[in-house]
Amino acid sequence: MIARLPGPDTSTKAAAVEYAKKDPRFAAMLAQSAAYRWPVGFQDDLYVHDLNLVRDCPDLEFVWILREMGSHLYLVDDWCKGSRDWARGVCDYYSGTSKSNYGDTRRRFFYVRRTGDIKEVTCDEAKALVSRVPEEVTA
């Protein structure tokens, strides 16, 4: 798999591939990255930052934005309103309709489930997922 992933074959990339053997969520993310050959630039977004968040949140789900030039990973059911607002704003920015970033179609939105299932979703579906409030916050 490592040869199909974007970027040079570094120890960082190798460590990400090794971790994916233990976590089906991250394995699914790497499979999508290999399929699209993205990110072309800013691979540390995936191999370092996304990996760290997935590893630090072993039982959680995410919205993942895979872009030609990087990636973004946000918790689903985040207890922090500010984090939910930020994630919605980033989704809007990469929606392809934002006046600040109009026409950027080199991105995909994914719902990464606890089980490792990954599903491509629309921007609106991604925004709905990152907008969910955990039950313990509303109880």
Image (cartoon, helix red, strand yellow):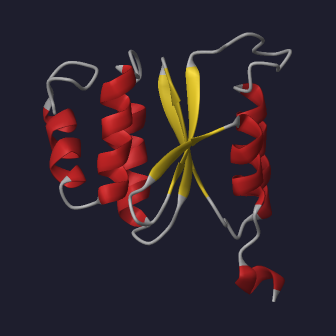
Residue 100 vs 120, above or below: the answer is above
Residue 49 vs 9, above or below: the answer is below
Left or right relative to 54: residue 104: right
- Whether residue 43 appears in this view of the structure is no
> Residue 7: percent from the left, percent from the top?
26, 19
**Residue at point 41% right, 22% down?**
39
> Residue 52: percent from the left, percent from the top?
37, 53
Left or right relative to 75: residue 40: left
**Residue at point 70% right, 70% down?**
79
Quarter containing the C terminus: bottom right
Quarter where residue 10 is shown: top left
Quarter containing the N terminus: top left
- Whether residue 138 appears in this view of the structure is yes
Please give the count of numbered marks on the rendered protein: 0
Left or right relative to 63: residue 125: right
**Of all residues shown, which one is farthest toward the bottom?**
139
Q: Nearer the viewer, residue 137 or 107?
A: 107
Quarter where residue 40 is shown: top left
> Residue 94: percent from the left, percent from the top?
69, 26
Left or right relative to 81: residue 18: left
Residue 113 vs 28, above or below: the answer is below
Quarter where residue 132 is shown: bottom right
Q: Which of 25 and 139 is in front in this view?
A: 25
> Residue 6: percent from the left, percent from the top?
28, 21
Residue 114 vs 66, above or below: the answer is below
**Residue at point 31% right, 37% down?**
31
**Residue at point 78% right, 32% down?**
92
